[in-house]
Image: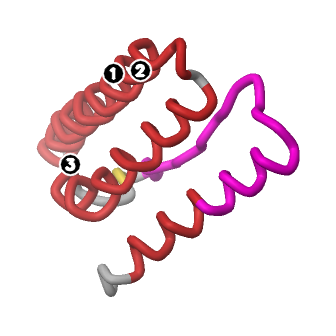
């Protein structure tokens, strides 16, 4: 994947949300859905996630937090950190389970 495309997507999303919020107003809440898990394993390795996805989430999430939830900024920041911590823990648990399965076969 060409890494030069990722900042373009980030800029697109931020400009899109800015325009949307200006025209329609701020929402009461916001939900971003990402599915990094598949039946047989994660979508990508933690290393790939850290290199390709997380740096842009670190920009997009604070942007949304500041615009939509200025008074809840600490709560949202903790939620994002907990989400990433749980993601990494789930990957570890999955790897351990997968190793047990391969030994049983």
Residue 102, relative to residue 96: is it above or below?
below
Q: Are marks 3 and 2 in contact (CB under 8 Å)?
A: no
Residue 24 in the image, given as x and y percentages of width and height: 87, 44
Q: CA distance from mark 1 to mark 2?
A: 5 Å
Q: Residue at x 50, y 71 (%)?
A: 9
Give the number of callouts. Answer: 3
What residue is shown with label 2?
Answer: 79
Residue 20, relative to residue 91: is it above or below?
below
Tell us which disc is closer to us: 3 or 2. 2
Q: CA distance from mark 3 to mark 1?
A: 34 Å
Q: Is residue 32 magenta?
A: yes
What is the secondary structure assignment of the residue under circle 1? Answer: helix
| Closer to us: 74 or 34 | 74
Q: Earlier in the sequence, mark 3 or mark 1?
A: 1
Left or right of residue 84: residue 14: right
Residue 105 numbered mark, or none: 3
Q: Are marks 1 and 2 in contact (CB under 8 Å)?
A: yes
Answer few, some or many: residues within 10 Å of disc 1's Cα (few below 14, many 20 plus, some between 14 and 19): few
Residue that sits furthest to the bottom in the current view: 2
Quadrant of the image occupied by residue 93: top left
Q: Earlier in the sequence, mark 3 or mark 2?
A: 2
Answer few, some or many: residues within 10 Å of disc 2's Cα (few below 14, many 20 plus, some between 14 and 19): few
What residue is shown with label 1?
Answer: 82
Q: CA distance from mark 3 to mark 2?
A: 39 Å
Q: Residue at x 49, y 42 (%)?
A: 63
Residue that sits furthest to the right in the current view: 24
What is the secondary structure assignment of the residue under circle 2? Answer: helix
Magenta part of the chain: 15-39
Left or right of residue 24: residue 52: left
| Image color mode | secondary structure
């Amino acid at each position: 994947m060409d890494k030069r495309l990722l900042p373009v997507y980030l800029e697109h999303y931020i400009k899109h949300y800015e325009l949307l919020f200006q025209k329609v107003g701020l929402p009461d809440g916001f939900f971003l859905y990402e599915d990094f898990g598949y039946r047989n394993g994660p979508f990508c390795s933690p290393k790939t996630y850290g290199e390709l996805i997380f740096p842009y989430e670190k920009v997009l999430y604070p942007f949304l937090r500041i615009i939509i939830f200025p008074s809840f900024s600490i709560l949202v920041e903790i939620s994002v950190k907990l989400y990433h911590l749980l993601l990494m823990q789930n990957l570890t648990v999955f790897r351990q389970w997968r190793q047990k399965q391969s030994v049983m076969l």
